[in-house]
Image (cartoon, coloured by chain):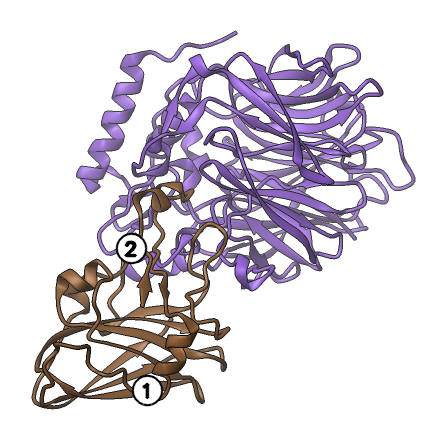
Chain colours: A brown, B purple
Amino acid sequence: MTLRPTTLRQIALLSCAFAITVPLAIAPARAADAVAAVAAPAAGTAAGSATLEVKFSGIEAPTGAVLFAVYDNEAAYAADGHAVREAMAPVKDGAAALSFAGLAPGHYAIKAFHDIDGDGKMGTNPFGMPTEPFAFSNDAKGNMGPAVWADARFAVGAGTTVQTITIR
Amino acid sequence: MTLSLSRREILSAGAMAGAAMLCPQLALAGTGDADWTLGVADVEDDLAPAAMERIHGRAPAGLAGTLYRNGPAKFRRGGTSAGHWFDGDGLMRAFRVSPDGTASLAARFADTPKRRQEARLGRMVVPGFGTNAGAGAVLGGPDDANPANTSVIAAGGELLALWEAGSAVRMDPETLATRGMKTWRSDLAQMPFLAHPRIEPDGRIWNLGLSGGSALVWRIGADGALQAAQTIKLPRSSYIHDFTATARHLVIVLQPWIQDKFSLPFVDSLSWRPDQGTQVLVIDKDDLTKRRLYELPAFSFFHLGDAWEEADGTIRFDGCVEDNPSFGMTSARAMIQGTYVRAPMPQLAMIALHPAGRATLTPARIAAEFPRTDPRFAGTARTRTVHVGHYGGARPLAQSIGVWDWARGRDDAHDFGARQLVEEFVFVPRAGGAAEMDGYLLGTTLNLAARATELHVFDARQVARGPLCTWRAAAALPVSFHGTWLAG
């Protein structure tokens, strides 16, 4: 998963200089691999006992899928670095959901966008503003950038944890 | 005459604005004591359609339609305040003139995410041109800060309330209900769209959307459908509020008020660099890669008149130029606090771009702002410029209107006096007429003595004779920016 970071220049160029950019992109081939399930835990990540059920609501466009990345630490989340899971949940009847088993209990945060046109990329206008809906876990809101880890992180314990995210 | 802005005045205004941000209680619910502050007072609610009282003359036969005007009308909530005149919530006003000579006024706020967020919080928190973000502001993109407060055009059977750093906002021409953001194409959502599109006589619309040194050139058909959107590079990251056009060229004036840093609010990211002069970029409408660049001495500006091209290739256009941008940087901030800080007066000037590469600026030697022209002549040769004027008293804002005749070097003006705040007037053609300025001027004033907004009609060729007809509203609305006339 490639995440283009928000640059100061991108922000500074905005006429009112307050926009968020969380361009999140999954290459189409990899997105296809991720469909319908759960990308396998990355090498070196110990499998755990926890299950995370991620549900997306509030989806307006009936097409495409929600693409999202799950992070287990602040540094990776902030830098769009290594995600412990990345996935693609097809949109059906205004909702999308995926379940991950085998996570280690701990704190996680999610960045997501609704890939309405199915091109595997977060759509942006010519000046870099997102044109496809996006969201963060806890429905945390960003201000001049992605929501911060402290607002987006949630606990995953043993057993099943449900995280419901509203895609705006 | 040029009034200089002293350093002390700048500092006191800056200190005042700063103090107001630190101590919200200084941002009073009303404004200062001076009578002109009625022009930047808050409107709390939409205005249902109500008859206006005819207080002078009678409407010309055959004049029927609606003057839509837009401007900021809500600046303060819960002890907090917008930091700049340009950042209040847009209130769309509809002044309807009926065939029987009666007039009515209705007004409705653009129902924007900004207004909803601030109404919910009970505080002004959304950043803008000259306003800092307040605690709790949530912004997912430019349109979350869009006040839809600067201008209005009709396109594709609906009204578009225009800002400059985000989308046009769609409104119902009858009810003024907000329909949502205008997205011409899904990949162009949230793209900036200036409040000053140039409209060809056949209805085709050209506009720019700016982001630093890049511009999106919008081309929209008379039917309101997108024809083209192309990104171009500009030689510098000037603040661009307005541009102009001939029949064949786009003319983009690049003042040396340059975005050279990242700073909030937006206006603080701009630096005034008079040593760099003003540039004028001319671009072929049919091939945006064909361009010429002209150089002029430094001036600042907000508004230009339509341009035209002569047989030898000379391009001419007028504009309201200022010695420096301290009105936008300082005075328009202080206004919201009820303080008048003098700034260089806007002066009407004609700019000529000669084929050999030389550019000249010739002042008319009158104070003028809000230039408007006969829209049937957009892009072709003309001689007249409608403007407001008579600045420079002990208060901001204009108190007269006039039509400047470039051929005779003469102004045909009417002074409303010190107790009226004069807003932009637009030209309305007379049915059956075709010559330039054969028609009427329609515009509004805020009568400080009567504490009421007034609508006036002038004969565009006999302005000095005073209004042909004046109607007075029951309400006093704050001073608005720009409008458009829709006949019928």
Left or right relative to A154: residue B196 = right
- Circle 1 is placed at which residue position? A97
Q: Where is residue A70 drawn, in percent x and y?
A: 22, 74
Instruction: Give me the chain letter of mark 2.
Output: A
Q: Where is residue B473 drawn, in percent x and y?
A: 59, 45
Mark 2 residue type:
Gly
> Can you see residue B393?
no
Asked whether B99 or B306 is in front, the reply is: B306
> Can you see residue B353?
yes
Secondary structure of residue under mark 2:
loop
Q: Which one is earlier in the sequence, the residue at label 2 or at label 1?
A: 1
- Point out the residue furthest to the bottom here: A159
Asked whether B319 or B76 is in front, the reply is: B319
- Circle 2 is placed at which residue position? A145
- Point out the residue furthest to the right here: B432
- Point out the residue furthest to the top here: B1
Crowd rating for badge 1 (residues with CA inside 10 Å; few <14, some 14–19, many 20+) = many
